[in-house]
Image (cartoon, grey):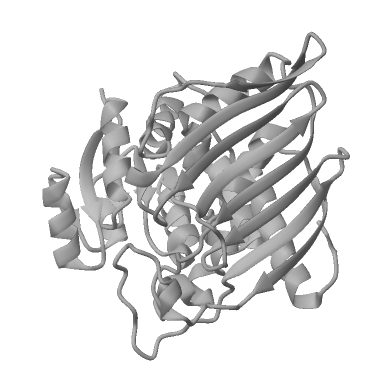
Amino acid sequence: MSTKIAIIGAGGMAAYHATGFRQAGAEIIALCDVNQSAAHRAATKHNIPGVFTDVAEMLKKLPELDAVSVIVPNKFHAPLALQALKAGKHVFCEKPPALSAKEMAVMQTTAAKAKKTLMFNFNNRARPESYAMMDYIADGTIGTINTCQAKWIRRAGIPGFGGWFTTKALSGGGPLIDLLHMVDLGLHFMGYPEPAHVLARTYQDHISNKAFKGPWGIPDVTNGTTDVEAAAHGFVTFKTGQSMNFAVSWAEMNQREEVSVTFQGTKAGGLVRRLFGTDGLDNTAIDACQLYTLENGRHVNRDIIVPADETMGRVRSAVNFVRTIEGTEKPLNTPAQALSLMKLIDGAYKSAATGKPVAL
């Protein structure tokens, strides 16, 4: 029998979740959204038979459900994940895991108690470039990664003004929590070491300037709230002796949008990068995956050729969730890693607020 899944949320990410679940052989039997018309439109678009506006009603009426995916504003990630876990369902949740490490810790405990899988859509781990780089890490080619630079910077990428993205009570913060993917990917390559300290600064420049709005057509909300950062920069030390720099922004005076992790290992360095010609539009992207080595006494740069993936791993990440439930693949991420990431983000925001390094 195929795994039966429901999607909670009618937003654009539902397309990637639905495609990935089906590629893995799962059956999507319902879609739930508080906006009834949006729920019907998305269900029709993605050929999903059941439509609900209340999660509790859906869980009650569909006892055969094995799992749910959660695609809603950040504030509701933890409550909906906990509701589903307590109902005995596996959960695949969009990033960020929660608004805080405290919420994430409750989610981890609840998943363990329910003996259910809890995973997050850290989709950049599922990119072909990332899989390839992990092979070189696993076989010892790279050695120990001492230092890492994680970057997701945009020149003009504010996702609307006054909406939930720019309202801290709903989002948890600005680009640092929204674009956490490269920090996560850097940690993934480094073996997810335990962080020791973080020093960070956030910047509000341009956060209310509509010349820096992103190209996705997200509507502005008149008299809405915009109380998050436009950019965040920081430095993290780990108890292993490793370290990481990060730079994350929606709006900065950059040349172009860059999504990248660069690292320096004891045997080789590496780079996974995507450059956007137009912020947020994949059809102008240039991808790179490279190793930097010493061979026969000479410095050598090696291009790693992998298949193109315009979904940036979003579909493959959903495939991995289903295969994890069914026991045919190992999970690309764990609740313990998500908790460590949220502790780092909490610490970065605290450091920015106090102007001091924060012990983690």
Judging depth in this view, the residue of 254 and 326 nearest the camera is 254
Tell me the residue at 78%/16% (across/down).
Answer: 298
Tell me the residue at 70%/45% (across/down).
Answer: 149
Is 123 situated above or below 57? above
Q: Which image quarter is the N terminus in?
A: top left
Q: Position of residue 333 (x, y in %)?
A: 56, 36
Q: Residue furthest front?
A: 298
Q: Position of residue 117 (x, y in %)?
A: 49, 37
Image-quadrant location for residue 325: top left
Q: Is residue 38 visible?
A: yes
Q: Is residue 46 left or right of residue 22?
A: left
Is 203 situated above or below 109? below
Q: Is residue 64 visible?
A: no
Judging depth in this view, the residue of 139 and 329 nearest the camera is 139
Q: Position of residue 339 (x, y in %)?
A: 65, 50
Q: Residue furthest bottom?
A: 223
Q: Position of residue 122 (x, y in %)?
A: 51, 43
Tell me the residue at 78%/43% (across/down).
Answer: 194
Judging depth in this view, the residue of 33 and 88 nearest the camera is 33
Tell me the residue at 54%/44% (across/down).
Answer: 111
Q: Is residue 63 left or right of residue 177?
A: left
Judging depth in this view, the residue of 344 and 143 nearest the camera is 143
Image-quadrant location for residue 76: bottom left
Q: Is residue 271 left or right of residue 194?
A: left
Q: Which image quarter is the C terminus in?
A: bottom right
Image-quadrant location for residue 6: top left
